[in-house]
Image (cartoon, rainbow, N blue to C red):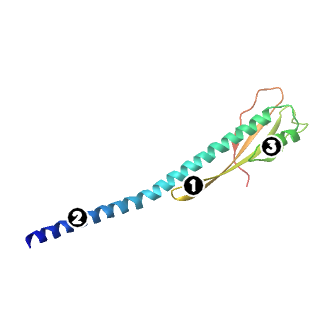
């Protein structure tokens, strides 16, 4: 009888230890899962931001390839780059010496599968580029997007 009582006590202690470990594991997963999901979403947003910058640089390269081109040609050159929408072209005969200023928007939507399902990040930024014939290239400016 005594042997049976000890075995029962050992089993009870083992079950209690397993229950405690299970409670701690469930608590740890419940706390860590939202943190990991946020980190995964932030990583996806950073990738979208880098892609927006890369597309804007590609559009800048297209614009500066022929600085003597007219407004319509510069608009078409920028719009040929995927993800670029030209918002405004400022220039004309009176500004020819100053150059042509293009305002364009770059949009990127990224999706990725994760442990938590599909995640999506959409990034939109606006840029301005001044194109002047005969002078060095102007820097690409990040500007606020119009409403």
Residue 39 coordinates in the image, percent (x, y): 50, 51
Tell me the CA gap for discs 2 and 1: 39 Å
Specify the quadrant of the image occupied by residue 3. Answer: bottom left
What secondary structure is found at the residue carrying circle 1?
strand
Reading the image, the residue beneath label 1 is 113
What secondary structure is found at the residue carrying circle 3?
loop
Taking the image as shown, residue 3 lies to the left or right of residue 106, namely left
Taking the image as shown, residue 22 lies to the left or right of residue 94, namely left
Residue 2 coordinates in the image, percent (x, y): 8, 71
Q: Nearer the viewer, residue 28 or 143?
A: 28
Reading the image, the residue beneath label 2 is 14
Specify the quadrant of the image occupied by residue 27. Answer: bottom left
Q: Nearer the viewer, residue 64 or 134?
A: 64
- Crowding at dot 2, Cα within 10 Å, few <14 / some 14-19 / many 20+, comes out as few
Indicate which label's residue lies in the foreground, 3 or 1.
1
Q: Is residue 23 above or below residue 58?
A: below
Q: Quadrant of the N terminus?
A: bottom left
Query: Residue 80 — which label?
Result: 3
Which residue appears at 78% of the width and 36% of the height? 62
Question: Which tag, 3 or 1, sits closer to the chain's start?
Answer: 3
Tell me the CA gap for discs 3 and 2: 68 Å
Residue 52 coordinates in the image, percent (x, y): 67, 44
What secondary structure is found at the residue carrying circle 2?
helix
Question: Which tag, 2 or 1, sits closer to the chain's start?
Answer: 2
Which residue appears at 40% of the width and 59% of the height? 29
Tell me the CA gap for discs 3 and 1: 30 Å
Q: Residue furthest bottom?
A: 1
Q: Is residue 20 above or below residue 47?
A: below
Q: Quadrant of the C terminus?
A: bottom right
Query: Residue 71 — which label?
Result: none
Which residue appears at 87% of the width and 39% of the height? 73
């Amino acid at each position: 009888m005594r042997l049976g009582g000890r075995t029962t006590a050992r089993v009870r202690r083992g079950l209690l230890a397993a229950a405690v470990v299970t409670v701690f594991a469930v608590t740890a997963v419940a706390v860590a899962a939202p943190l990991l999901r946020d980190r995964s979403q932030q990583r996806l947003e950073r990738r979208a931001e880098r892609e927006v910058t890369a597309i804007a640089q590609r559009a800048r390269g297209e614009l500066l390839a022929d600085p003597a081109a007219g407004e319509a040609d510069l608009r078409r050159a920028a719009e040929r780059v995927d993800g670029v929408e030209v918002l405004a072209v400022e220039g004309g005969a009176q500004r020819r010496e100053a150059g042509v200023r293009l305002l364009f928007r770059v949009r990127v939507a990224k999706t990725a599968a994760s442990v938590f399902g599909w995640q999506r990040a959409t990034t939109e930024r606006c840029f301005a580029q001044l194109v002047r014939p005969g002078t060095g290239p102007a820097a690409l400016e990040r500007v606020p997007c119009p409403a």
